[in-house]
Image (cartoon, rainbow, N blue to C red):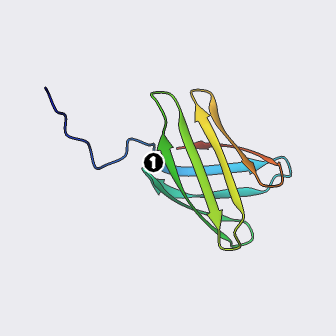
């Protein structure tokens, strides 16, 4: 039987993240791998993670200090997140 060593580093994308909803509210910040820290225009800090599901899909989850959450998924076309009120956030990673 051949064993393969599991990597300790995530293969999720890193860099500058920017998301915007229909009301033109923005959330932006930096992250690398599975840890991402964002800040919105009101000064709230959003902490989250990116987990690779398969070759083409990454799942994102964010939570702020007030307990609000945003989660979603990305594929080869872009990133789409949805908050708990049903607003859609679209974004990118540089």
82 or 91, which lies in front?
A: 82
Q: Residue furthest front?
A: 1
Q: Which one is nearer the viewer's eye here, 25 or 61?
A: 61
Q: How many marks?
A: 1
Left or right for 78, reference 42: left
In the displayed structure, does residue 42 sit left or right of residue 56? right
Q: Is residue 37 above or below residue 13?
A: below
Q: State the residue at coordinates (45%, 43%).
A: 13
Up/down of 94 relative to 42, above or below: above
What is the x, y in percent for residue 72? 65, 43
Q: Residue furthest right?
A: 23
Residue receiving disc 1: 14
Which picture quadrant has residue 42?
Answer: bottom right
Q: Position of residue 63 (x, y in %)?
A: 63, 63
Up the image or down, 53 lies above or below 30; here it is above
Image coords of residue 84 (percent x, y): 78, 55
The percent coordinates of residue 51 (x first, y second) are: 48, 44
Q: Which part of the image, by quadrant, shows the N terminus?
A: top left
Q: Which residue is located at x 79 percent, y 56 percent?
A: 25
- Left or right: where 32 falls relative to 47: left
Name above or below for residue 65 compared with residue 59.
Answer: below
Q: Residue at x 46, y 30 (%)?
A: 54
Instruction: Report which quarter residue 76 is drawn in.
Output: top right
Label 1 element class: loop
Identity of the residue drawn at 52% across and 44% down: 94
Q: Residues within 10 Å of mark 1 (few under 14, many from 20)?
A: some
């Amino acid at each position: 039987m051949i064993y393969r060593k599991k990597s300790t580093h995530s293969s999720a994308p890193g860099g500058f993240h920017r998301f915007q909803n229909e009301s033109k509210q923005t959330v932006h910040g930096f992250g690398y791998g599975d840890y991402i820290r964002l800040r919105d225009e009101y000064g709230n800090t959003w902490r989250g993670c990116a987990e690779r599901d398969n070759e083409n899909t990454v799942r994102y989850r964010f939570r702020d200090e007030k307990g609000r959450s945003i989660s979603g998924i990305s594929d080869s076309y872009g990133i789409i997140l949805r908050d708990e009120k049903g607003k859609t956030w679209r974004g990118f990673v540089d």
